[in-house]
Amino acid sequence: MSNVVTPEEWDAWRAFASMRRKLELALERQLQRDAEISAADYGVLLALFEAPGKQLRGRDLGEHLSWEKSRVSHQVSRMEKRGLVERRECETDLRGSWVGMTNDGTRAVLGAMRDHAATLRRYFFDVLEPAELAAFKTVSKRVIDVIEPEIHDEG
């Protein structure tokens, strides 16, 4: 494979990068406006909402979100101050802790889900034909499959 990127490839990359940034910004604005939470808050809350017992170990939360330990810690601390999550001691491992949802966190994520899904539908799903959506999924998984072994090799 050549390391040379063609003009067509650059155009495709710039279009993708611009789309991703603008979609993330639109989703962030919607979450702030409708649920008064950030996209990072929503990611944490959704991961906890879907987890057994609505709690995860900090390291598992980080793996789920593809975040570094320090980012998880800072985000959880900010959310804890706002009453969205709480840390609980892990009885089987004194070095670790559980991050669990509070009732306010559950209300926040449930309040955000419908509007967030509608925004995703409006800006992403509704503009793609079924074949394009399938191709997007295939391409996304293929790129992830190339990246993930490299990430694991670094650790």
Image: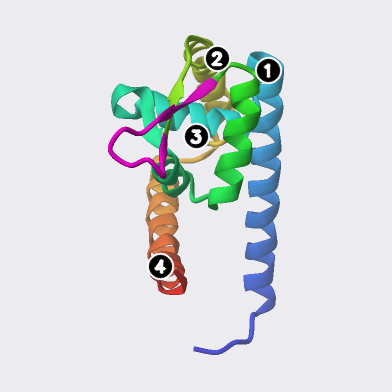
User: Circle 2 sits in a helix, a strand or a loop, which is it?
Assistant: helix
Residue 78 visible? The answer is yes
- Are the residues tagged 2 and 1 within 8 Å (C-beta)? yes
| Label 4 crowd (10 A; few <14 / some 14-19 / many >=20) | few
Rendered position, 49 above or below 96? above
Which residue is found at the position 47% from the left and 73% from the top? 154
Q: CA distance from mark 2 to mark 4?
A: 33 Å
Q: CA distance from mark 3 to mark 2?
A: 24 Å
User: Circle 4 sits in a helix, a strand or a loop, which is it?
Assistant: helix
Closer to the camera in the image, 51 or 22: 51
Question: Could you tell me the amino acid type at mark 2?
Answer: Ala
- Are the residues tagged 3 and 4 within 8 Å (C-beta)? no
Looking at the rendered structure, which numbered label has been put on residue 152?
A: 4
Residue 123 visible? The answer is no
User: Circle 1 sits in a helix, a strand or a loop, which is it?
Assistant: loop
Q: CA distance from mark 1 to mark 4?
A: 35 Å
Rendered position, 106 above or below 90? above
Question: Could you tell me the amino acid type at mark 1?
Answer: Glu
Residue bearing mark 3:
125
Quadrant in which residue 34 is drawn? top right
Rendered position, 28 above or below 53? below
Decide whether residue 11 is among the magenta residues.
no
Which residue is found at the position 33% from the left and 42% from the top? 93
Left or right of 4: which side holds 114?
left
Q: CA distance from mark 3 to mark 1?
A: 24 Å
Quadrant in which residue 149 is drawn? bottom left
* Magenta-highlighted residues: 85-97
In x, y percent, where is residue 16?
63, 55
Q: CA distance from mark 2 to mark 1?
A: 8 Å
Residue bearing mark 2:
108
Q: Quadrant of the C terminus?
A: bottom left
Decide whether residue 90 is among the magenta residues.
yes
